[in-house]
């Protein structure tokens, strides 16, 4: 537990709370307030990973979201595994277990590294595309090897025990980032009374204020941050969300905020008050105004071996020293092109460790920080840069040389300086990612050597992301934007008084990205641009030589920016290198596009609670409990659970269905038909509307009568069907298919509202209001008669396709004499709450008739025997009413050209050889054909062979005593009596005779009794 | 994620309450039987599909269940106006207007 | 053309990779070409390649407003399969599949076509009827396919939740072993390099601003680099087809919609095949780099913004976590959108137009990548002959007038 790099004082860690953790099987200690990265650095862990292509040892480079190397596998148990955790963003907790994602047998002694160092030169960008082609048969083997070598962490083998949720929020002003600019903006907006949300991705809010050397109102900058946060906490309309990343910025100021609620506590969400906490919460925020205060990312310099552990960006060095009291080395060389990075050397020196030299690319560094360094007698080497690092698993020395930036060459002798740490700074790139999510292209600014956000309506960038990174500027910029945003959302916001900050004088930065080496870039030791993807400057140069000139081509050919860090450190450097190779400027080379997420977000957090039972609502009828109690097997139809069949004892499905079928044909059966869509249609033009909507005529349907209707789209294809009853002159009750109910209602609204608004008609969904019970069979009338005394059930007075209102089992009911089985049938509709009572009453009285509940499968058999179609089974969006042989249901003479009519006379719909509905009788009467079997005209299989149709429905009929099927067949109505063939996957060829689709009681005598 | 002003509810609501229904102002031929196959096919399937201002039909499906029209830029996704069925758009491609300038 | 091989790679390594040639030139536009292909995506580049290779027409320009392969070729989920229901579509996609199987060798460019199999899940009885129907049709058309039961599914994808506990339990699947994934960018680059070697000019950063006609005959295209003449112009611009059609003075039965996709962070190999589900609506494969590549649903509104709505991404990941509960802790790295040109029948248009000499190849909707070589191949034949290739003939624009649609939405009707 040495923590040899930990300072005795300072930092924002809590030394009174030591925490033990394990990395690659070794126990270490850190403190509360550490990140995993700061704790590893405190313990002198240099190598945290191996690179995926060259297997080079890699160390921690940065202190935040931009870290490319320190990607670890987290989790103490299998279910708790989290792949690809960025150590710089993972708070340390007691018992944390982490491991490197690559390296075999381990990161320190990695055997792949040998292959990487020898084979590296054979793996330029695009090498996959140029190799592994011969022989073609070996590609799957090559690919297996490539896949194994790729990838970072591993997926847990068990399901995630944690839960995630979503919350919708609305605010006037959303401030993203709680650094100086963000805090000033939030405070200014919040004081107006506006609803403000302030979020920040870090463990602690304050951003650069937490490691600043500057004073605010004469006190440490972090104290001002604390004061602002304290004030915000008192304001009721303000929501402050720490550990919350704005991960995606979508249209119209919709921003998703990913709040990690427990990841800083444990790898599995701990319980609170006996309940498992939510691991992460997604805030779905609609903001009036967005203030983007996301700051900057420091660019490292690109030089040879800049990936050897011990290389950090300068700002990260300051962060580790000042926030975490960790000095990640002994002897520092700083290579910079700007003043701001001098902080790293000053902090290092002030921590009591040696600054070997500051190597400044500028000839004449001038500024307050430069002077501070001079005052400490730190050696400053002007006009120079670190051109190469030395060392394998840790930097041991650097080579420093004078450079000619414009000429891109080394301009003087090379000096070697012994050191163990290199801090570099090439400048500061505004964090434009979120703004770019909206499609706004970032714009290059020469004065700050960086891209700033493009214009997004309702968004204001402030502080570093706005090119105003100096503390004094950031505070003023943030406060002004906060005030303005509150005003734009309708609040009176007085300007806030700014805290006092001394102005820091800084010299102009130099534009340095790739550092020249004594050798040309193609021959120099590797200069890494995107270390996670092992993209080098030479790789980019090669890409441009090969004609990959667009920056998008360069990125895709080399892989630059496709890592889990999305190139936060490397992209601008890469563009600069491409620009150099193509002899053009950075803005000419292109801009940089970013997509959500800003940092990766778990699938779980995005999915939220919407899996399993919440994936899609499940709908149950009022009788569901009865069905469950009586052993029903269920079928999913749309969102509904419908009884499929009701097995008794050990009955198979086939046996149960045969029994249910016989019961209906011989006595009486009952079906829960409640799931059918039901729509009330009222208004003086209701009848006319039906005339236009349905293919058949409705003008003459009297009150008390029902009619079957077929609905087409305007292309003439059948879309739905059902029975509609005339309740009163201006009042109809429509039924639709179970799955089609919502779509049909929308369809009706569409036509009414957009095409025929002059019709006075109103629609209402009443699907759930009515429960429907269909009793079918020769004994149906006798059974119903026992339960009603106010409906005349006689055949003369209650005819087929009539409906009557009355009382059934003592409750008000509508009884429809309609039939989907061809039997004498009554569909009893009652208010859903009464359903179980009526259903029970039917069974009480029905026992003597052997009343049998049946499900959808029996319903299918019975209706198919009658040749009744099921929309969606016999139809597939390509069948017209005529194809289905339903000319009887087409009102050719209706005066209004109803929906679909015109399409029936198009050249293709008039063809005689269209697929038409037929019946099939298998030559082997016991053989139930496969639904979905294709139909051919020849017995001999030759592939490919022409197909003329397919089987849509197929069953064994106990009533007919043989198997039968419905099918659609080209020119089928002309093929009656012909034999067709059905070739099966196993090589058998079945034969069937084409027959009428009506197999049973073609005259309809049974339903008319 | 669009934020849509429903002209019937007179409120901005979330996109998830709405369903887009394609190009607006498509007139069904008044006398379909007199329409040629070409006219009928055009009515059914052929669309302007502009890159830029688009007059389109929306349905407040999980709200008031009313259809209405929107003028929306199909590149920026900015909605310049919404208006009721039967009304004409006030922002039209190629014409400048105050609302249009907001883009 | 510099030949690519493992041996060549070693040789180049010895000279520090300083002698690799350009994969394609960056030429100045000529005044006139025999054929202009508008659109330098995969389909357009394939068209140019096959024009030169199979029809000897090498005086060809590909006019691209951005960078080669920068549209949907760069944005898709790289799935290749040919198990379509209707004959016309199945033949076209199978034609493409056969070309895929020899493409790396033909182009001397490894497009990394990985025949790891494509599985389409069924979750309802009607799904299973449709799967049987499609697989039977595929088999009789000579396209590989079989119907899998739960046990077989679980053997191929052991990590998928095939239990009864999901909202829509899996009932079975169709399986096309020859299907798989390919490296999307490499497809564009391989065709571009091959076409360039045969003399085709790739004109990048050259936007077509107008189509010049004389009477009813095309004369060439106006571009940001001046007018370029050609007697034959083939437009292959996917989501922007409507814009080009408008320039030529007609409309198409096409609407452009955002289609989104996303990738996870790279993982060690965990999923060895492509899994697709229409019912819960998600599809996923794992790239050779280790990312889970996931396709989202189409956004309902028209859009050229290359981005869609967040709720679509949410629904997609709900579907993925529903199918693969162990992916819950995997993280989504990036999402993006393309512009897909959708036809009413979910089939493409490969067709002559009202303008003589002007042909369109568009409307591939959400599934164009898999067709890339086949689409280019039949379109090249169409441009070369001035009349449709037999496999392209059913995909004429005229079908929207006659009603002879090829409805690949499949049996997506309603259920009782």
Image (cartoon, coloured by chain):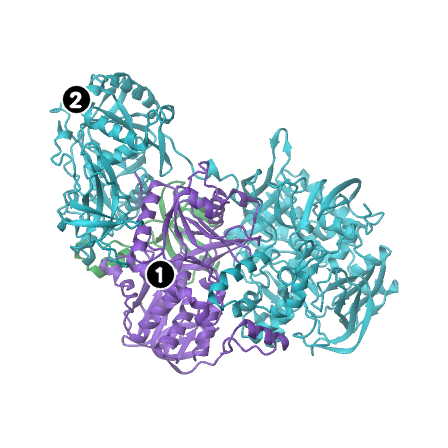
Q: Give the residue at x 66% y 40%.
A: A266
Above or below A965: residue A326: below
Task: Write down the colour of chain B.
Answer: green
Q: Can you give x and y, in whole percent of width and height, for residue C356 in the image?
A: 28, 74
Instruction: Tell me residue A511's x, y (percent).
Output: 69, 70
User: Which mark is on residue A793?
Assistant: 2
In the image: residue C282, left or right of residue A523 = left
Residue A552 vertical position relative to residue A688 in the rendered view, above or below? below
Q: Which numbered tag is attached to residue A198? A: none
Alpha-carbon neighbours of circle 2 within 10 Å: few (<14), some, or many (≥20)? Answer: some
Q: Say which chain is cyan.
A: A
On the image, which quarter does residue A387 sit in? bottom right
Q: Is residue C223 left or right of residue B34?
A: right
- Residue where numbered disc 1 is placed: C93
Element on which disc 1 rests? helix
Q: Residue A642's spot in the image, x, y percent?
A: 34, 32
Estimate how packed mark 1 is, as few (under 14), some (14 to 19) or many (20 or more) residues with alpha carbons within 10 Å. Answer: many
Question: Which dot, 1 or 2, sits closer to the camera?
Answer: 1
From this view, report whether residue A541 is shown above or below residue A753.
Answer: below
Measure how far apart labels 1 and 2 are at the Cα level.
60 Å
Identify the secondary structure beneath mark 2: loop
Q: Which chain carries label 1?
A: C
Instruction: Read off the chain for label 2.
Output: A
- Chain C drawn colour: purple
A144, above or below A263, in the image: below
Q: Do the residues labelled 1 and 2 touch (CB within 8 Å)?
A: no
């Amino acid at each position: 537990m040495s923590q040899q790099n930990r300072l005795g004082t300072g930092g924002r860690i809590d030394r009174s709370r030591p925490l033990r953790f394990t990395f690659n099987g070794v126990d270490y200690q850190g403190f509360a307030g550490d990140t995993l990265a700061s704790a590893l650095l405190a313990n002198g862990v240099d190598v945290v990973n191996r690179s995926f292509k060259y297997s080079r040892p890699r160390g921690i480079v940065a202190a935040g979201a931009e870290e490319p190397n320190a990607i670890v596998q987290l989790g103490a148990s299998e279910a708790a595994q989290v792949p690809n955790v960025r150590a710089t963003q993972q708070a340390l907790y007691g018992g944390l277990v982490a491991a490197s994602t690559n390296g075999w047998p381990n990161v320190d002694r990695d055997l792949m590294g040998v292959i990487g160092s020898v084979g590296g030169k054979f793996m330029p960008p695009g090498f996959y595309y140029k190799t592994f082609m011969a022989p073609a048969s070996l590609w799957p083997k090559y690919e297996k090897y490539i896949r194994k070598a790729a990838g970072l962490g591993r997926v847990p083998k068990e399901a995630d025990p944690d839960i995630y949720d979503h919350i919708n929020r609305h605010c006037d002003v959303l401030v993203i980032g709680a650094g100086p600019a963000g805090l000033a903006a939030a405070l200014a907006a919040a004081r107006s009374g506006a609803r403000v949300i302030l979020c920040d991705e870090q463990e602690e809010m304050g951003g650069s204020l937490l490691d600043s050397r500057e004073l605010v109102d004469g006190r440490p900058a972090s104290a001002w941050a604390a004061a602002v946060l304290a004030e915000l906490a008192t304001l009721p309309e303000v929501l402050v969300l720490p550990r919350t990343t704005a991960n995606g910025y979508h249209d119209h100021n919709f921003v998703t905020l990913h709040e990690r609620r427990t990841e800083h506590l444990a790898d599995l969400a701990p319980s609170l008050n006996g309940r498992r906490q939510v691991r992460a919460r997604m805030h779905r925020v609609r903001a009036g105004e967005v203030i983007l205060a996301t700051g900057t990312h420091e660019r490292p310099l690109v030089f040879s071996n800049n990936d050897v552990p011990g290389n950090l960006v300068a700002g990260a060095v300051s962060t580790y020293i000042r926030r975490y009291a960790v000095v990640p080395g002994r002897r520092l060389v700083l290579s910079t092109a700007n003043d701001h990075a001098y902080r790293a050397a000053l902090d290092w020196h002030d921590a009591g460790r040696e600054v070997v030299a500051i190597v400044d690319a500028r000839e004449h560094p001038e500024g307050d920080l430069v002077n501070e360094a001079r005052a400490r007698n730190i050696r400053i080497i002007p006009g120079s840069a670190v051109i190469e690092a030395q060392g394998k698993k840790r930097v041991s020395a650097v080579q420093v040389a004078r450079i000619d930036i414009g000429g891109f060459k080394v301009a003087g002798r090379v000096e070697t300086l012994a050191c163990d740490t290199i801090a570099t700074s090439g400048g500061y790139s505004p964090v434009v990612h979120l703004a770019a999510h909206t499609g706004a292209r970032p714009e290059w600014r020469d004065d700050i050597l960086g891209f700033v956000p493009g214009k997004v309506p309702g968004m204001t960038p402030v502080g570093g992301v706005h090119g105003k990174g100096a503390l004094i500027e950031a505070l003023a910029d943030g406060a002004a934007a906060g005030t303005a945003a509150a005003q734009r959302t309708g609040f009176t916001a007085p300007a806030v008084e700014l805290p006092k900050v001394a102005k820091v004088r800084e010299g102009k930065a130099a534009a340095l990205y790739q550092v020249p080496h004594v050798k040309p870039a193609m021959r120099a030791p590797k200069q890494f641009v995107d270390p996670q993807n092992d993209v080098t400057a030479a790789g980019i140069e090669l890409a441009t030589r090969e004609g990959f000139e667009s920056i998008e081509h360069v990125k895709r050919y080399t892989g630059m920016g496709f890592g889990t860090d999305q190139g936060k450190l490397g992209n601008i450097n890469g563009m600069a290198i491409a620009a150099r190779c193509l002899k053009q400027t950075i803005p000419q080379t292109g801009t940089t596009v970013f997509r959500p997420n800003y940092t990766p977000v778990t699938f779980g957090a995005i999915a939220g609670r919407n899996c399993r039972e919440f994936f899609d609502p499940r709908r149950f009828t009022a009788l569901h409990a009865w069905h469950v109690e009586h052993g029903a097997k269920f079928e999913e139809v749309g969102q509904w659970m419908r009884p499929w069949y009701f097995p008794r004892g050990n009955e198979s499905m086939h046996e149960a269905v045969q029994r249910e079928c016989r019961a209906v044909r011989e006595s009486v059966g009952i079906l829960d038909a409640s799931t059918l869509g039901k729509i009330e249609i009222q208004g003086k033009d209701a009848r006319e509307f039906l005339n236009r909507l349905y293919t058949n005529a409705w003008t003459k349907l009297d009150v008390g009568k029902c009619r079957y209707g077929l609905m087409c789209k305007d292309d003439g294809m059948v879309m739905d069907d059902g029975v509609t009853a005339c309740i009163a002159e201006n009042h109809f009750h429509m039924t639709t298919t179970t799955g089609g109910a919502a779509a049909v209602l929308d369809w009706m609204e569409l036509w009414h509202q957009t095409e025929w608004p002059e019709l006075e008609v109103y629609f209402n969904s009443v699907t759930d209001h009515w429960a429907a019970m269909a009793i079918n069979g020769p004994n149906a009338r006798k059974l119903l008669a026992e339960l009603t005394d106010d409906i005349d059930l006689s055949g003369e007075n209650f005819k087929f396709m009539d409906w009557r209102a009355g009382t059934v089992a003592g409750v008000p009911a509508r009884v429809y004499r309609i039939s989907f089985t061809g039997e004498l049938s009554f569909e009893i509709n009652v208010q859903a709450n009464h359903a179980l009572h009526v259903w029970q009453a039917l069974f009480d009285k029905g026992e003597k008739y052997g009343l049998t509940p049946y499900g959808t499968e029996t319903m299918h058999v019975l209706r198919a025997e009658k040749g009744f179609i099921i929309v969606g089974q016999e139809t597939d969006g390509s069948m017209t009413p005529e194809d289905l042989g339903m000319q009887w249901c087409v009102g050719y003479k209706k005066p209004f050209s109803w929906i679909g009519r015109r399409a029936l006379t198009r050249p293709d719909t008039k063809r005689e050889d269209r697929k038409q509905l037929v019946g099939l009788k298998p030559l082997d009467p016991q053989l139930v054909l496969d639904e979905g079997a294709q139909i051919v005209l020849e017995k001999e299989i030759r592939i490919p062979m022409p197909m003329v149709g397919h089987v849509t429905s197929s069953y064994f009929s106990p009533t007919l005593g043989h198997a039968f099927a419905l099918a659609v067949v080209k020119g089928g109505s002309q093929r009656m009596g012909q034999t067709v063939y059905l070739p099966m996957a196993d090589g058998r060829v079945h034969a069937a005779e084409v027959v009428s689709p009506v197999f049973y009681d073609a005259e309809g005598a049974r339903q008319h009794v | 994620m669009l934020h849509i002003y429903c002209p019937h509810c007179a409120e901005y609501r979330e996109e998830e309450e709405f369903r887009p229904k394609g190009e607006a102002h498509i007139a069904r031929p008044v006398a379909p039987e007199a329409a040629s196959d070409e006219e009928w096919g055009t009515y059914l399937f052929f669309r302007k599909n502009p890159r830029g201002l688009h007059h389109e039909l929306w349905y407040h499906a999980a709200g008031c269940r009313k259809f209405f029209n929107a003028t929306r830029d199909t590149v920026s996704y900015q909605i310049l106006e919404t208006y009721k069925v039967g009304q004409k758009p006030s922002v039209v491609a190629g014409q400048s207007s105050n609302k249009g300038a907001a883009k | 053309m510099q030949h690519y091989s493992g041996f060549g790679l070693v040789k180049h390594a010895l000279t520090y990779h300083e002698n690799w040639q350009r994969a394609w030139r960056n030429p100045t536009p000529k005044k006139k070409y025999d054929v202009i292909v508008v659109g330098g995506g995969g389909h357009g580049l394939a068209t140019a390649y096959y024009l030169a290779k199979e029809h000897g027409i090498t005086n060809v320009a590909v006019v691209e407003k951005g960078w080669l392969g920068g549209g949907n070729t760069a944005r898709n989920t790289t799935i290749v399969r040919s198990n379509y229901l209707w004959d016309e579509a199945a033949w076209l996609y199978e034609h493409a599949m056969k070309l895929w199987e020899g493409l790396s060798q033909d182009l001397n460019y490894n497009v990394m076509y990985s025949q790891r199999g494509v599985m389409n899940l069924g979750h309802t009885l009607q799904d299973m009827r449709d799967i049987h129907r499609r697989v039977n049709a595929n088999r009789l058309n000579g396209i590989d396919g079989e119907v899998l039961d739960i046990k077989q599914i679980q053997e191929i994808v052991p990590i998928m939740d095939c239990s009864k506990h999901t909202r829509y339990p899996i009932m079975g699947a169709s399986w096309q072993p020859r299907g798989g994934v390919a490296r999307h960018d490499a497809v564009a680059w391989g065709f571009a390099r091959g076409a360039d070697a045969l003399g085709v000019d790739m004109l990048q950063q050259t936007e077509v601003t107008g189509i010049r006609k004389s009477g009813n005959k095309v004369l060439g295209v106006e571009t940001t680099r001046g007018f370029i003449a050609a007697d034959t112009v083939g437009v292959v611009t996917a989501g922007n087809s409507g814009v080009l059609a408008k320039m030529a003075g007609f409309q198409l039965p096409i609407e452009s919609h955002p289609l989104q996709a996303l990738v996870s962070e790279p993982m060690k190999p965990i999923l060895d095949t492509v899994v697709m589900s229409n019912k819960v609506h998600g599809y996923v494969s794992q790239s050779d780099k280790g990312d889970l590549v996931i396709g989202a649903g189409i956004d309902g509104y028209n859009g050229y913004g290359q981005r869609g709505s967040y709720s679509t991404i949410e629904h997609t990941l709900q579907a993925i976590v529903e199918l693969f509960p162990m992916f819950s802790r995997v993280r989504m790295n990036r999402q993006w959108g393309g512009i897909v040109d959708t036809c009413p029948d979910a089939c493409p248009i490969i067709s002559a137009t009202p303008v003589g000499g002007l042909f369109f190849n568009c409307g591939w909707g959400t599934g164009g990548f898999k067709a890339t070589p086949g689409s280019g191949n039949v379109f090249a034949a169409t441009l070369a002959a001035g009349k449709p290739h037999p496999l392209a003939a059913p995909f004429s624009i005229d079908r929207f007038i006659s009603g002879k649609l090829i409805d690949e939405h499949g049996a997506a009707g309603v259920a009782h």
